Amino acid sequence: MKSSFYGLIIVFGAFACISLASPVPAVVQGPDQWTLNATFTHPQPIELRQDSDHKTVRFWYMIITLTNNTGRDVDFFPKCDLVTDTFQITPAGKGVGSIVFDRIKERHKSKYPFLEYLGKTDNKILQGEDNAKDIAVIWQDFDHEAKKVSIFITGLSNETIEVEYPTKDSEDTQEEPNKVYLRKTLEIKYDIKGNPASSSGAVLEYISKTWVMR
């Protein structure tokens, strides 16, 4: 039991070190690396009344416009997490029915007539402005105790980095450390204003965006 406890301490300590000394994306990408151009709307809520119990359920969404100016067609396998300062991680699309996207598409049909849903978009982004994609990213409502949220969007670049971290076993036996592969990820930070639990809900106030390895 004691050895398991110390093993957990080493693992969590290693991840803490990785977080404190996080690698950053390359200033100049290599010849085989690419990054898509991405613009986005800030997250906003949408509420739907459930037929089963007539309760109102709130979701959050943003619309990302992706343009491929890399000089090649690229594979697109996105992962979008909403992370609160209370350590709640909500993956995009989890618990989101198709009706939510339908309502969002109807709301924005004049500006984004070809809006796609993240979970059903094509896994290939073709070159050029004419092939730009408008994609809706949708999350369930977040923790009402949170004061800040960060949105992490992975899949916009093929840049990766390998990070080693020791485990108790590797220290005792001098085995090779475990390896973690981090991907270039767009992080967008927001403050939460208002009361998320109230009928008027919360407003996300933009702080910053940056590229990180995650």
Image (cartoon, rainbow, N blue to C red):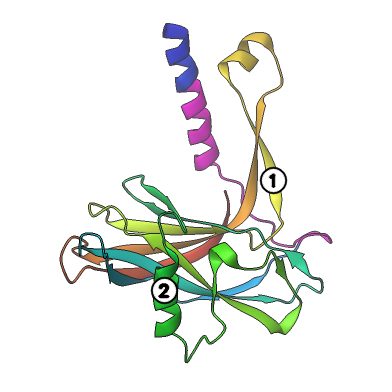
The residue nearer to you, when weighing 65 against 14, is: 65
Quadrant of residue 34 in the image? bottom right
User: For mark 1, does the 10 Å Cα neighbourhood hold few (<14), some (14 to 19), or many (20 or more) residues?
Assistant: some
Q: Residue furthest bottom?
A: 110
Asked whether 4 falls inside the magenta stretch, the response is no
Q: Residue furthest left?
A: 198
Residue assigned mark 2? 42
Q: CA distance from mark 2 to mark 1?
A: 29 Å
Check disc 2 and give the amino acid type: His
The magenta stretch is 10-33
Check disc 1 and give the amino acid type: Ile
The residue under the point 42% across, 14% down is 5
Residue 72: image location, x then y, percent: 81, 71
Asked whether, in this view, residue 32 is left or right of residue 3, the answer is: right
The residue under the point 69% across, 13% down is 174
The residue under the point 66% across, 80% down is 132
Asked whether, in this view, residue 8 is left or right of residue 88, the answer is: right
Residue 64: image location, x then y, percent: 53, 73
Q: Secondary structure at mark 1?
A: strand
The residue nearer to you, when weighing 84 against 123, is: 123
Q: Is residue 54 above or below residue 16?
A: below
Split into 4 quadrants, where in the image is the N terminus? top left
| Pointer 2 or 1: first along the chain | 2
Q: Secondary structure at mark 2?
A: loop
Residue 46: image location, x then y, percent: 32, 72
The residue under the point 31% across, 63% down is 191
Residue assigned mark 1? 161
